Image: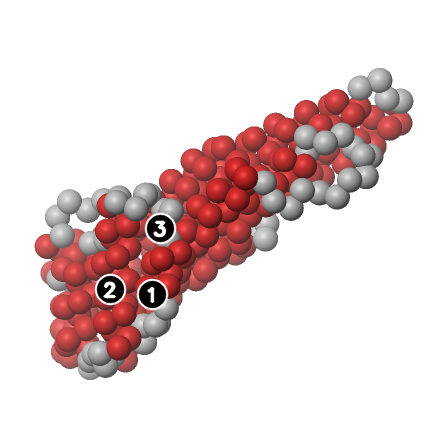
Amino acid sequence: MISNRAPIISVLVVLLELWLVSCATPDAVSKFCGSATSTLAAAAPIFDDMKQSCLREVNSRNEFATFTPPIQNEGNCSLIGDQAKSAAAAAKILSEYFTAINSVASFGTSKAGTDAQKLLSEATALGGANSATQTALGSIAQFLVSAATSGYRQIQLEKDLSKASGDVPIVVTALVTIVRDDYIGRQLLSEEQKLSDQYREFARNKSPELTLMLDGRWHADEQGIAARRASAQNLVIALETLSKGFTDLATNSHHLKAKELAGLLEPYAAQLQTLVPQIQKAF
């Protein structure tokens, strides 16, 4: 969370000055925002897998060769699925926010989406109804609605962008917590443990040949979990990079020239572009 919002409020003012003075698109800002949007889009399959991981764990409690259809729904898994949908909706709101900044930096007007309020209603499980995360999401969503319906031009739009910009790191932190603590730290770990228990129980008193076959199958399933964990870990790194890059831009942009701004943002954009394929690797 950023404690001093004054530097952040100056970000869009500086973007406007750079655009007007240099008569050139601030490509570094556009590239960073595009990389941020790609990162947030790559997060969607990971959020989708949270409920599926829970269901895989539930189904792993059954013995092999019971020949019963897998469970498609379960109370706790449904709750996890609701939380995941909220995280996905919050990521989409952030994505539309960065799209709006990109549009302002590149064209002088916003191309914000019009589904922000719908997404906000879907994100209510993220952080709790009265949390700072919900307040931050509401601020960003309100800007997106205004930008989409008021026909703002650049000089008008930067004022509303600055109002929401301090809320971005709050939402990113909430997404990191869900991926790192809930998905990696609990769901995948529990799925992995239950899967091992299932194989171990079934292999008891079996022939060496069957035990060897089960070992090979377990390794294949374990590799799938490891791949999903690696993708999620890369997403955590990417989200933290996104937040740090945005904070550095907010803190330093008021005294940087266009070339210096590019030097500040390009390493963040490059790292995000490298991480996106790693996030997508298991999905």
- Name above or below for residue 66 compared with residue 85: above
At label 2, which amino acid type do we have?
Gln
Q: Quadrant of residue 181?
A: top left
- Is residue 34 found left or right of 196 in the rendered image? left
How many other residues sit within 10 Å of disc 3, few (<14), some (14-19) or many (≥20)? many
For disc 2, the marked residue is: 142
The residue lying furthest to the front in this view is: 75
- Is residue 232 found left or right of 227 in the rendered image? left
Of mark 3 and mark 2, the one earlier in the sequence is 3
Of mark 1 and mark 2, the one earlier in the sequence is 1
Image coordinates of residue 112 in percent, x first then y, are 32, 72
Image coordinates of residue 90 in percent, x first then y, are 37, 55
Residue at (83, 26) in percent of width and height: 211
- Looking at the image, do the residues carrying marks 1 and 2 touch, with CB atoms under 8 Å apart? yes
- Looking at the image, do the residues carrying marks 1 and 3 touch, with CB atoms under 8 Å apart? no
Of mark 1 and mark 3, the one earlier in the sequence is 1
Residue at (28, 68) in percent of width and height: 144
Image coordinates of residue 238 in percent, x first then y, are 40, 50
- Give the number of the mark in front: 3 or 2: 3
Between residue 250 and residue 118, name the one nearer to us.
118
Q: CA distance from mark 3 to mark 2?
A: 15 Å
Q: CA distance from mark 1 to mark 3?
A: 13 Å
> Which mark is drawn over residue 116?
1
Q: CA distance from mark 1 to mark 2?
A: 8 Å
- Give the number of the mark in front: 1 or 3: 3
For disc 3, the marked residue is: 124
Residue 269 in view here: no
Residue at (38, 61) in percent of width and height: 119
| Secondary structure of residue under mark 1 | helix
